Amino acid sequence: MFELLFQKFDEKIGLTEDEKELSKSFFIPKKLRKKQYLLQEGDSCKYVAFVEKGLLRSYKVNDKGAEQIIYFAFEGWWISDHYSYLTGEPSEFNIDAMEDCELLLLSRQAEEQMLEKIPKMERFFRILLQNNLIATQKRLFSSLSHTAEERYAELIKSCPTTLPQRIPQHMLASYLGVTPETLSRIRRQMTLKVR
Amino acid sequence: MFELLFQKFDEKIGLTEDEKELSKSFFIPKKLRKKQYLLQEGDSCKYVAFVEKGLLRSYKVNDKGAEQIIYFAFEGWWISDHYSYLTGEPSEFNIDAMEDCELLLLSRQAEEQMLEKIPKMERFFRILLQNNLIATQKRLFSSLSHTAEERYAELIKSCPTTLPQRIPQHMLASYLGVTPETLSRIRRQMTLKVR
């Protein structure tokens, strides 16, 4: 259950076997079936979740009742509503499972205790936040000044190669902020270009 | 020169007078005249800058040669290209002064040394990154699913009240990702609604 998480730790910080064993005690293993919620709008976000297996999405329902997908989280990624997690305020977002998932949950309190017991982890979470910030900034820039076609190409590049099989078209369209019809047109054009 | 920075430290962590004195030694005071660059596209971003006085912007020149403003930094805010700062890669962004500025610069090396000498600072920079991430995520959501009018209202709300006098209209338009003509129309409509 912890293989992928430990691999991520190893990529960024050097933990001893004892520290790895200790770190396990702070995470809560959790399975979600497809379509189950990890977080519902209006609830406070109690955990950050590491995805050992499966795929989740975070989304918001806008004033017109449409789902706007903010983020997909694949194996090896983290997902949470950071604002709600940190402040305890009710979340404006939903997080649900797009496939059967195996997660490792970390509560605020467990995170604080883990940082206290294993100070190297401060570094791990700072790097994680930095990378998340960089990715979000890139996406913001791209949403402001790239076309939907360019943004689709960027998404395909940044995600696992299995993405097109794993994410339904209408969800990809919602992530890109375009209608499903526009996405179909983009995909047709891109296929024509490749030929 | 350090009043505002120390105020920010006090809001988030408790530093002793000795620690504050020590922290000064890691920052490089720097004055920029209006229109001078802190960072130019293609250079590596060597510093994060704290704004004691003045106003800066970060922007990118897109494929069509137009400036896309990503971020404004007022007094008490930080500005940098985090990706370039962390990786040493050439930056895709420009940062320049929109007014005469007084800055406190922190290099990677100085930051690492400061974190080592004053471990409480880890917490300060983690909180800073978290807040930055939350703000960027909000802005991303808003760029994906709010109208330009809603985004303009959010900007006005989140910035100092002096914003309209300090930022030229064409730069506000660039930040919002709309043409100056669209921004004028939005402002006229908002004025009519207020009356």
Image (tube, coloured by chain):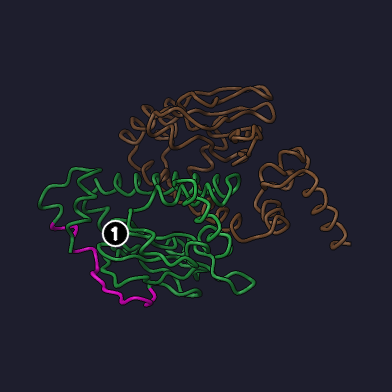
Chain colours: A brown, B green
Along the line of sight, the residue nearer the viewer: A20 or A94? A94
Q: Position of residue B23 (x, y in %)?
A: 19, 57
Residue at 60 percent across and 22 percent down: it is: A31
- Report the residue that reaches farthest toward the front: B195
**Quarter occupied by residue B99:** bottom left
- Is A140 above or below relative to A23? below
- Is B105 above or below relative to A189? below
Can I make out residue A43 in this image? Answer: yes
Give the secondary structure at mark 1.
loop
**Residue that numbered label 1 is attached to:** B75
- Is A106 above or below relative to B47? above
Along the line of sight, the residue nearer the viewer: B162 or B5? B162
- Magenta stretch in the rendered image: B21-37
- Report the residue that reaches farthest toward the left: B17
Along the line of sight, the residue nearer the viewer: B104 or A181? A181
Q: Position of residue B177 (x, y in %)?
A: 57, 59
Along the line of sight, the residue nearer the viewer: A54 or B37? B37
Which image quarter holds the C terminus of chain A? bottom right
Is residue B178 magenta-colored?
A: no
